[in-house]
Image (cartoon, rainbow, N blue to C red):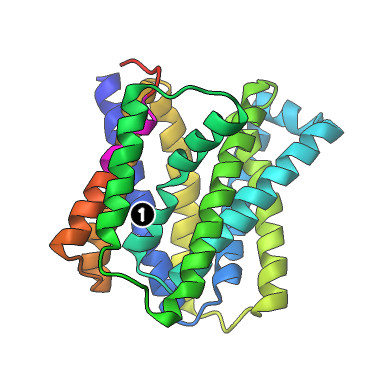
Amino acid sequence: MERTRAILFALLVTFLWSTSWVLIKLGLSQDLPPLTFAGLRYLVAFVCLLPLAAIKRDSRAQLLHLEGRDWARLAALGLVYYAFTQGAQYLSLAYLPAALVSLLLNLTPIVVGVGGVFFLGEKPGSRQWLGVLLTGAGVLIYFQTGALPADRWFGFGVAVFGVLTNAASAVMGRSVNRRGNLSPLVVTTVSMGVGAVLLLLLGGLLQGFGSLTWQHGLIIAWLALVNTALAFTLWNTSLRVLSAVESSILNGLMLPQIAILAWVFLDEALTARESLGLTLVCLGVILVQLRGRRM
């Protein structure tokens, strides 16, 4: 029963995270500045998570006794993951279809894996190399039509920047969590707060705050309360039961979900060739993440 509930929680979370892409596109279509939009979402989510961290005894003690080195690591993580990666995601979605941005960001494990080979001396297994080949084939098939329209190159460049910073933040996050002195809740809360403030500063300076409407407020509130605070809690609850393999596979289901939701709600239809490319990328990314993991 507990295992079934964990799987259902994880499936619900991947669906909620997938709907985020549609909601972001809807918010952007109503002239909400991308960086400001991202900053407001994570600021509201931070305000929701902070009381949870303060209520839990262990988390509260960790927050009150954070050392200077911990603050520096969490601030750096907030800068790279929230300000850079999430900012890039929102900004690129203003120019590109949701499925394309999702495909690019799903290349993060590939970038991390390749970086591990060159910089950490890691040796991928045959399953990981197969995943890399499948992912590469999927990307080639997806982009087979040739060059992007001129007005999309900026968004493409921003998305690629987001992939690189997402890969860097994955390594940074792994380093912070492996120290074991801070709970995931504390790491997320502090880094999110730092990132939210930086995003709002960047958004205010570069794009302004726009004219917030009640529709904007509803989208931001849902993204912050449900798709961030609630989803984070449910995901971490499910991870107590699910294996790393299961969580990787379930997380990999986001890409096709995003493509389907974008088709239904945003009229971003995919051709058969693009669908095949997305499928291969999804399978390849899952394979890359399964090294040394058992059910």
Question: In the displayed structure, does residue 215 sit left or right of residue 41?
Answer: left
Q: Which residue lies furthest to the left in this view?
A: 272
Name the residue type under label 1: Leu
Q: Which quadrant of the view contains residue 238?
A: top left
Picture quarter with the C terminus: top left
Q: Where is residue 199 in the image (x, y as percent from the top left)?
A: 66, 63
Residue 12 visible in image: no
**Which residue is label 1 attached to?**
103
Q: What stretch is highlighted in magenta?
A: 282-290
Main secondary structure found in the magenta portion? helix
Question: In the displayed structure, does residue 254 sit left or right of residue 73?
Answer: left
How packed mark 1 is, by other alpha carbons closer than 10 Å (few <14, some 14-19, many 20 or more), is many
Who's the residue at 73% across and 28% down the image? 62
Task: Answer above or below: position of 279 versus 113.
Answer: below
Picture quarter with the N terminus: top left
Q: Position of residue 29 (x, y in %)?
A: 41, 79
Q: Where is residue 96 in the image (x, y as percent from the top left)?
A: 40, 71
Magenta highlight on residue 30: no
Task: Answer above or below: position of 96 versus 293.
Answer: below
Task: Answer above or below: position of 194 versus 293.
Answer: below
Q: Where is residue 147 in the image (x, y as percent from the top left)?
A: 35, 72
